[in-house]
Structure formats: structure tokens, C-alpha cells
Amino acid sequence: MRILAYIIKRALAAIPVLIGVSILTFLISHAIPGDPARIIVGPKASKEAVEAIRKEHGLDRPLPVQYVRYMKGLAQGDLGQSIRNHRPVTKDLADFFPATLELTLASLVLCLAVGIPLGILAAVRRNRLADHVARVFSVIGVSTPVFWLGLMLLLLFYRNLGWLPGSGRLDITSSPPAAVTGLYVIDAILARDWALLKEVLSHLILPAFCLSYVYLAVITRIVRSSMIAVLGQDYITTARANGLSAARVVFKHAFKNSLIPTVTIAGLSLGELLGGAILTETIFAWPGMGKYVVDSINSLDFPAIMGFTLLASTAYVVINLGVDVLYAFLNPRIRY
Amino acid sequence: MRIWTLCLLLLITALAPAAMAADKDTLVVGVSSDIHTLDPGVSSDNYDWRQIYPCYDRLVKYKVKDGVGLTEVEPMAAESWTVSADGLKWTFRIRKGITFDDGSPLNAEAVRYSFDRTIAIGKGPADNLTAIASMAVVDDYTLEITLKNPYGPFLQTLATDGASILNPKVADRAVNDDKAQAFLAENVDGSGPFKIVEWTRGQRCVLEAKPNYWGGAPKLKKVIIRFMTESADRRMALEQGDVDIAENILIDQIPALEKNKDVAVKRFPSQMVEYVYVNCQNEKLKDPAVRQALSYAVDYQGIIDHVLQGNGVQMRGPIPDGMWGHRKDVFQYTKDTAKAKELLKAAGAENLELTLIYSERRATWEQIALVMQANLAEIGVKLNLELMANPTLRDKIDKGDFELCLGAWSPDFADPYMFMNFWFDSAKAGLPGNRSFYKNEKVDELVRKAEVSSVVEERKKLYGEAQDIIMQDAPYIFLYQIQTIVPLRANVQGYVFNPMLESMYNFEAISKK
């Protein structure tokens, strides 16, 4: 029950944060010089046409009026209409967010599935070959530009070897599965379309790897160092002295205690991955939020920019909360 | 380690061979940008038009002769037309037997409805139709259009995307008096050779051919437009045979493509030009001698040879080669440092410091800005470069808040009006067209006279005279006309490039061997 009260308290505390974010984004995006009305009607249009559009979208009203109008809509779950494509922003977000989420989750899974074992291995075999390999792998990860890595991956696995498909979420000739969650992996499973599932997974491999590589390196290093710290503690020595097998010591006793910093980093990474997917999405023609946001900014599509920012900050708040709750499970000594 | 086994299994199941190339009756086009709206009455974006254009018929269309797209028009939904002696009254006879998907006929009322709708919506495409004062349906298949003034380019504007003919039944789809804008943003309802059957945002748009199209069934059954932001992606997919045509490949990737024998790289003279707006209202640039000096300073051929790698020709006057009204004999600047210095000295404008603004809209602009910086340094002018976001750049252009600015322009319809009236009429100052804020009463008079005449010879003469004055006044630095490069698979046949239909394809005539 105490945990539930804590969650509610944190959720309420998030509301002023989100309002602050909305005011800031609103002010900043309106401070950019440029005229969205002009973008809608096209550069060659007459001044009268521009004026008419400005009126239609309420862009001629004072900023506070525009803001209040926006917040009123928001209270009813209406994020406004995109200036660029004249659609409700909620619809756009529903189209583009799942693609980013799917890519991000796949990257996180990859990060943890590869980073944790690699980090443990490096810690257990400290200063031996495995450790050196893991270190080189990490250093390359931190210092490789995503753009270059993505193109090299495509060049190798798509063009030269032909093992994996090229860019996009699906093959060019395939239609997406019936939309339930928007996450193709889940939708394909729900549709029991195994061929499509295979296609979706094979399209996920390269971009997910590319996106996760930087964080993979970070997680490997964090796991390694916290593992080393834990392995040096008295209770591990005691456990060893009691004749427990090496594997049991590492996985049962040391691993759980070294997880806390990993959870922190994983939580942070998830937030960063969500926001940082843009380059990866560009290289792999991944139809996610990244491109949508850049296009929105380029055409001063205020409602779209606002919608994205609010969604992203909400995601951040939720992830942070999740991380804090997870702490409590991992270490009951942590109090709220 | 179970997790490793799982990963390995996952990888193995996923290691499928790359996608097989599409069927012979499916054409795949790899493009750089998604669609925003499918409404022909709303969109002023060439990338939207790519999908909209093949789904509708228009009164007239651009001619194709021996596989070359021309800028003249010929009948399409209009069988024939007559124009009154004063150039005001146009009477169109509409072809019988054209129907929309639901069986309703394309008739005079459909045309009237479509044009009315576009004008009433009042967005970008309406500009091309504002010459219309009124329309009258004489009988089912005869439409009489009365213009406000005689308007030379009128017929040309009827071949543009904004003049697409809609099924008037679409009016039933209107919500809250929006003239069916919400519906047409995501759907098409035309009588063209194709219709849109799927649009997955950010991924692809699928067009299906109509076998019973009145102009004959298209050879293809399906066209898939695949959205891929990265030039390198489109290039790889073209080389792998996953796409048949790849748009907007960066110039430096072209030589490698040309070595691939499965790929044909075609080049076409386009009507797209790039030039530098020289702000004529700016204190430092008010004197025509200073502007002439700038025009003499630039190394045009160097830019074409090195930045464009030969894919362009130097402009001669404002009207590009290939458009009537272009004059091969009009004066054009070439690099002459000594003369430029002399002009600056005589104008008392030595030690000039200027700023050139540009955006990332075109990949070549950064390099061109650097070349110009070096060129101007040779005549003692210090050029500062300022890169900014496109919306900001546009805002500055509209307000006249700049000294020099890099720009690109392509005509909406095949008439020199798109250059002469837009660029030089002082009433269009700012973003609408006259981006150098140029004002010359004589030129105003000449181009306005040409606008209301429908006699080509007379208009040619008027525009010709204006060009001589303009070149002396040097309100722009006229750089080059771009060559459009279209890389396609060698088995693609029947592709026709039309300089007036940039990014729009003649899908109805394309086939794959």
C-alpha cells in the first residue's frame, strides 16, 4: 500500500512539471521566427491567402490566448490539428509513436541481453582476454558515430551479404499487420502471421543494434564496475568460503546487488533512446517520431511540436517513476 | 547461458534472405519525403502532387513527342476549346464517356465544382485559378469560363495539379462545412488512371491501376512509393533491385551508380534554377553598379564544374532555356575580376562587407556559399556566411531582412510569367516572388502588359525588352539551371521526364521488361 501511495504522490507531482514543460515549449516554439501560415499556403501565395489561414488557425490571436485555447483542448484530450497535414495531432502521434517505441524497446532488450552478460564476463575475468575484448567493444561503441555505423551495417548486411533486409519496418511489397498496438511484433503475433513476424524481426535487428550500441557499451562498463565492487565485498568471500559454486556466487549473490546502478542507467537510456532515435530512424527509413518531429520543426508545425514534447516528457516521467519503484524491489532498504 | 541461446535462435530465424524484387507489373519508387495531404485543392507541394497527379484527369495535359515531355498542352478531358477575341471567354467542350469510380460522369458540372472548390478553399493551388471571374455550365458537356482580365498563361494553369477534376459527389463527405478537406486529405476521388489503395504514413503509398481507364489501361498494375529519407538508402535499394526508380540521389553518389550496368542514369534539362537574391532596398546594394560588380565576381563555370559536377548550365537571363521567351542573345555576366573592381571603385563602394544567408534545403548551397566567399574576396568584398533554418530564412526573405540570399525556383506552369512577373513585379515583393525587392517602373509596366496579353509574339517582345533592363540592373545573381538526374533500373521503360512535372511521373505509360 505504501508503494501505491508513493506512486500516486509522484504522479500528482508530475502535473506541474508537465504544465511547466508545456509553457516552455509553447514559448520557445513561438519564438522561432517564421510564419506557419505562409508554409501552409506555399511560398508563392498572396498576402491575403496567408492572412486568411492565419485567422483560420487562430495564429492572429495573442500568445496567451493561443496558449489557453491549446490547454483547453488538451484537457479534453485534443492536441490540436497539425498545420502541415491538417490531421489531429493525436492521430499522427498514434501513427508514429509505436514505431519509435518498438525500436526503442528492442534496443533496450538488446542492450540488457548483451550488455549484462558481457559486463559480468568482464568483471569475472578481470584483466584477461574477455575483459579486453569487452573494453574494446565498449570504446568502439562510445566513439562510433551512429550515422556511419548505420550505413556500414546496411552496406555489409544488406548490400554486400544480402543476409538482412534494407531500411524500413517491412519489406517494400508487404502491408503492415492489422493495427492493434501499432507495435508490429505484437500485432504480427496477434494475427498469427509468422512469416510477417519473421520479416518484422529481421527488419528490427540492424536499427535496434545501431541505436543500442552506445548504451550497450555504457551498460557493459557499469555492470563490470559494480560487479567488481560487489565481488570484493566480505559476504562474497564468505559465500565462497562456504563452498558455493562460482556460478552461484556470481549469479545469485553478486549479480542482484550489482543491478541497482544498471537499472538507473537502463532507465536513463530508455529515455535517451526514445529521444535519440532520430538519427537511426533517418538512416533506416524508420517511420517513427524522429523524422516526424524534424519535419514539424522545419515547417513550424506548433501543435505537432507541442504534442511530441508533451508525450516525450510524459514518457520520461513514467520511466523515472518505474526506475524508482524497481529500486525498492531490488533493495528493500531503500525508503520513500 | 540461456539468454545467448535465445539471442542466437532469434538471429537465425531472422536471417532471411533480402526481399525479392517486386513483380514485373509493380513499379517501386524510392523517394525522400512522405506525403502531407492528398487534396489537390490544398497541397502546394511537389511531393504530394507525385501521388495526386496520376489519380485525376485535367482539362489539358502536357504533350509528349518522341519520348520527350514538352511544355505545350494538348486536350485531355477537354476535347477542344475556343477563346473569344478579347481573350476573356473560354469555352471548353468536354469529352464524353469519362466516369469516376462510382459511375458518375465527368462533365461540365464536375469541372465547375472542382475549380470552385479550390478557389473557395483559397490555399496555394487557388492562386493559379484566381484569374477566373465566373463559370457557366452551358450544357452537360460544355463549360464557359470568363476571366477577370485576359491572362496569357491561363491554358497552362489548367494542366497543374490544382486544376484536377474531382467527383462532385465528394461534397457529401464534407464535415462542418470543410468542403470535404478532411476526407480528401487521405483519399482520392478522381477519374485518373490510378487510385490510392494504401498509405501507411512514413512508410509507403500504394497506387493501383484502373484497367478500365478511358485513356487505355496502364501497363503496370501497381505502383509502390516507398519513403526513404537517406540518399544512401535509396541508392542501395536501387542497386539491389528493391526499388526501380530512386529520386534525389546526391550528386557525389552518381558516378558509382553509373558504373552499375543494371542501372541507367538519365539526365534531363529542368526548369529549376538557382540564383542569389540581391536586396535592392539595402543601403549597400542600392547602386546598380555594386550589384553588377557582384555579378561579375562570381565564378559561374567553376560552381557548375566542381559543385554540381557538370550537372547544370549557366543561366542566360531570368527565363531558363527550354521555356519560350528565353533569349540566347541576352547579356549575361561572366567572371571578370578587374571589371568588378573597377565598378566598385567608381561607385565608391570599396571595403564592402556583406552577409550571405542560406539554409540546408539544398545539399550544394554550403559549397556554393564558400565559392562565393572566395570570389568576392578577390574583388575586396568581405562576405560573411550565415546558415539558418529554412522557416527562419523564409521569414527574413519575406521581410527583406537580408543582403544576399541563396534561392531556388521552379515554375508551376510552363509560361515565362512564372519568372518575369513573379520575380520583377514590385507588387510581388517578398516571399511571393520578387525576393530582391526590385522596383523599376518601366519593368513593372512591361511585365504587367505581357500578363494581360494572350498573343505570344507580343508577350515575347515585352518580356524580351524587360530582360535587357533587368540584366543591367542586376537584381539577382543568376547562377544556373539544374539538370535533373533520374537513376532507374535498366529494365524500366517508357519513363518520360517533363520539366513542368517535377517529381510527378507518367506511371500510366511506364512498364518493366
Image: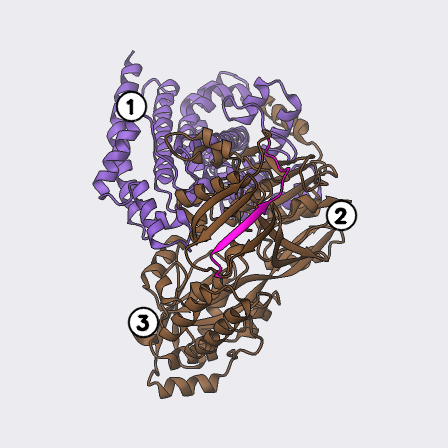
Instruction: Kindly report the distance in space between the C-alpha atoms of the residues bearing marks 3 and 1.
Output: 56 Å
Residue in front for this viewpoint, B241 or B158 = B158
Query: What residue is shown at x 52% (from left), y 34% (from top)?
Result: B187
**Horizontal relation, residue B257 to residue B229: left or right:** right
The residue pinned by badge 2 equals B491
| Residue B46 in the image, given as x and y percentages of width and height | 52, 49
Residue at the spot of label 3: B282
Q: Are marks 2 and 3 on the same chain?
A: yes
Q: Are marks 3 and 1 in contact (CB under 8 Å)?
A: no
Q: Colour of chain A?
A: purple
Q: Residue B309, relative to residue A176: is it above or below?
A: below
Gap between marks 1 and 2 measured at Cα: 60 Å
Under tag 3, what secondary structure? Answer: loop
Tag 2, which secondary structure?
loop
Q: Earlier in the sequence, mark 2 or mark 3?
A: 3
Check the image and name the residue furthest to the right.
B513
What shade does chain B have?
brown
The amino acid at mark 1 is Ala
Residue B100 magenta-drawn?
yes
Task: Say which of A173 and B137 sits in front.
Answer: B137
Residue, disc 1: A11
Q: Is residue B426 above or below residue A111?
A: below
**Residue A128 figure quarter:** top right
Q: Is residue A219 visible?
A: yes
Q: Residues within 10 Å of mark 1 (few under 14, many from 20)?
A: few
Q: Position of residue A242 (x, y in %)?
A: 49, 16
